Image (cartoon, grey):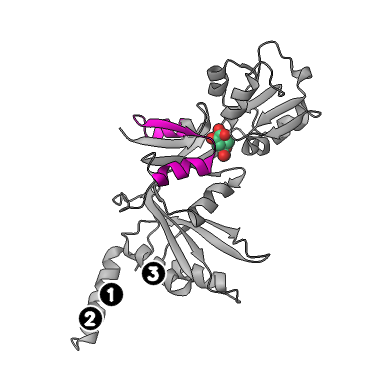
Amino acid sequence: MPKLAYLGPAGTFTEEALRILAPHAERLPCANISAALDAARRGEADGAVVPLENSLEGAIPTTLDEFAWGEPLLITAELLLPVEFSLLVRPGTEIGRIKRVFTHPAAITQCRNFIARELPDAVVVAAPSTAAAAQEVALPGSPYDAAIAACIAGEHYGLVELAARIGDRSDTVTRFVRVSRPGPPPEPTGSDRTSLVAFLTDDHPGALLEMLTEFSVRGVNLTRIESRPTGDGIGRYFFHFDFEGHVADARVGEAISGLHRVCADVRFLGSYPRADGVSPQVKPGTANGDFAEATDWLSRVRTGQV
Ligand SMILES: O=C(O)C(=O)C[C@]1(C(=O)O)C=C[C@@H](O)C=C1
């Protein structure tokens, strides 16, 4: 039975994602995303499950930066989880008495309208996770009056649900990934996604276009591109790419080796089955057979057979 680290404590959305991705895994709750990834790196766990992006808020910066700068890890699976938030209080607390709210920063952003409308005078404080907030609010002497978390976290820590589905949108989804220590990627399924990080050689006109061209000319469809600061000063960025296909696909292999030629560094983050089951768009001339036929043709040219 694998042991998987996750952003704890029990009752986080990440735990729910882990339960779906690996129902029989032993779960190791960690205080934050970095601690969960470190547990996997050090071998205290066989892998980890962490949030990567949210359909309303965008990418989770800690996860992106850990993948770029931390000891390498391999993404082996993804999951799209609908997220619904509840306002949770100790039994007997009325909404008018809520002065201090505790929750994860992602939940603050996703419940902005509810907070402005129903809790305009409350101070909202950032917690390490939604379930950590619920756990804290449940303590008798807690300085916080309410938590925003999953309904299940309220049940877990003995809180009462004062309001349900308080997110600004009812269709918000968070994308989670399962990672393990580096090794061969999972076999292609025909509906795969590949992720990598690319670092520019230097800042020059067309640098981003050069990278994008490597994907475009091989017919590789991007599903996400994100720039992150390198930390070396304003205007210095590196790039996260997600795209359709598997590293075993000829067009993907050619695109990422092209990227390796034009970039200072490329870190492969994994090829793994897509959660939405969507098949890649394959433009004419970019299927595996087309690349194989072109390679054969070139060797015939080089050996004087055409
Ligand atoms: O705090 C949690 O429950 C988490 O699992 C983290 C997290 C996130 O980082 O985005 C996950 C899903 C929701 O979008 C809100 C918080």
For the residues labelled 3 and 1, the Cα–Cα distance comes to 17 Å
Q: Judge: label 2 CB < 8 Å from ligand 1.
A: no
Residue type at mark 3 is Ser
Q: Mark 2 or mark 1, which has the lower sequence index?
A: 1
Instruction: Please tell me which residue is depicted at 36% across the width and 68% down the height of the picture.
Output: 254
Magenta segment range?
16-42
* Residue occupied by mark 3: 257
Provide residue 193's location: percent of width, then percent of height. 40, 52
* Residue occupied by mark 1: 294
Residue type at mark 2 is Ser
Instruction: Please tell me which residue is depicted at 56% across the width and 69% down the height of the picture.
Output: 208
Q: Mark 3 or mark 1, which has the lower sequence index?
A: 3
Residue type at mark 1 is Ala
* Residue occupied by mark 2: 299
For the residues labelled 3 and 2, the Cα–Cα distance comes to 20 Å
143 up-or-down from 20: above or below: above
